[in-house]
Image (cartoon, rainbow, N blue to C red):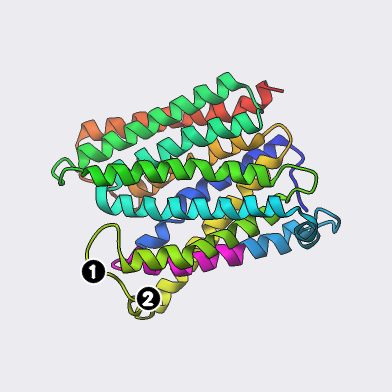
Amino acid sequence: MYQPESYGIALLMMLLSMICWGSWANTMKLTPGWRFQHFYWDYVLGVLLMSLVWGLTLGSTNQGPQSFVQNLRAADSSNIIYALLGGVVFNVANLLLVAAIEIAGLAVAFPVGIGLALVEGVVINYILAPKGNPYLLFGGLTLVVLAIVCDALAYRRKEAGSPNVTTKGIFVSLLAGVLMGLFYPFVTKALTGTNALGPYTVGFVFAVGILLCTIPANYMLMRRPITGGEGLTMQGYFAARGSWHVYAILGGLIWCTGTVLNFVAGRAQLVGPAVSYGIGNGATMVSAVWGIVVWKEFSDAPAGVMRLVALMFVLFLAGLGAIAVAPLWGA
């Protein structure tokens, strides 16, 4: 099993994780008009396939007790259950977050959901595995949260003429955020103990948990969409273009790559899950970059909105820098 031996490589993995988590949703932009529930079937397939690829490659280097297959066989059942539960909790949160985006819009759902998940996840993970300078870690976390707030305000001002946000949309956003902040502690528990899972094995079992949850949960959301309207059938899935299926699988491959890298980095010496999760959730800003630079979402925005966007990036970079150096100052 490959494990980074220097903090520099671990930091690179965390940054790549952040990029992957903030970039996979671009594949949804390439499938306009395809309902997310249909997209999700192929997305989950991509997640499962990529978890196997990482497990059978980097997870199987230097064959030994920590290699992918042997680690899976020797792990305690309790650790496997923790990893499965992590996948289930994440999947429910992810489905709710997408529903919240459809109800309340990206301007409210994403900052509320991911902002709450970021704070909750970092705090809980630091309690479980206290690594890194807490002042830098939580100071940087505060700056990242402020950046997310600026992101939300920018979107709200840009979409000032859109319908008012419903109470239902805010409630679903909050519920998604609470669950999103809880999945990583299950991963942390799966990685600890005498016969614990390794990060690559956790990635695979986590993906299995996502799959097992998706079958009933996504089917239920197809039949009774949270967003309202008539239920969906699998006809919409099979009627999609072949390229759309490829894009959805690609989205799963990208997201899973970021997740495995985050798990591996979080296991590295000095780093810890709180730092890894905190940097990974800078994905909110990465998605904002895609929206601004590639999808031109702010091309017609007034100057005041662009000043908020600029402040967002300054706060984010400062917060990310503080979190990144927290393990070094805490040594």
Can the viewer see residue 87?
yes
Q: Does 295 appear above or below 235?
A: above
Determine the residue positioned at 38% across, 69% down. Answer: 38
Element class at badge 1: loop
Q: Could you say where residue 317 lies in the image, as x and y percent from the top left?
A: 47, 31
Element class at badge 2: helix
Q: Could you say where residue 281 lies in the image, as x and y percent from the top left?
A: 49, 40
Residue 284 or 166: which is nearer the viewer? 166
* Relative to 171, 127 lies left or right: right
Quadrant of the rendered image containing residue 33? bottom left
Q: Residue furthest top?
A: 135
Can the viewer see residue 200?
no
Q: Could you say where residue 315 lies in the image, as x and y percent from the top left?
A: 42, 27
Numbered badge on residue 230? 1
Q: Is residue 307 magenta?
A: no
Q: What segment is highlighted magenta in the picture?
A: 31-50
Determine the residue positioned at 19% across, 37% down. Answer: 302
> Given the image, on which type of amino acid does mark 2 rest?
Tyr
Residue 137 or 311: which is nearer the viewer? 137
Q: Which residue is mark 2?
A: 237
Residue 288 or 40: which is nearer the viewer? 40
Q: How many neighbours does mark 1 have within 10 angstroms: few (below 14), some (14-19), or many (20 or more)?
A: few
Of callouts 1 and 2, the N-terminal one: 1
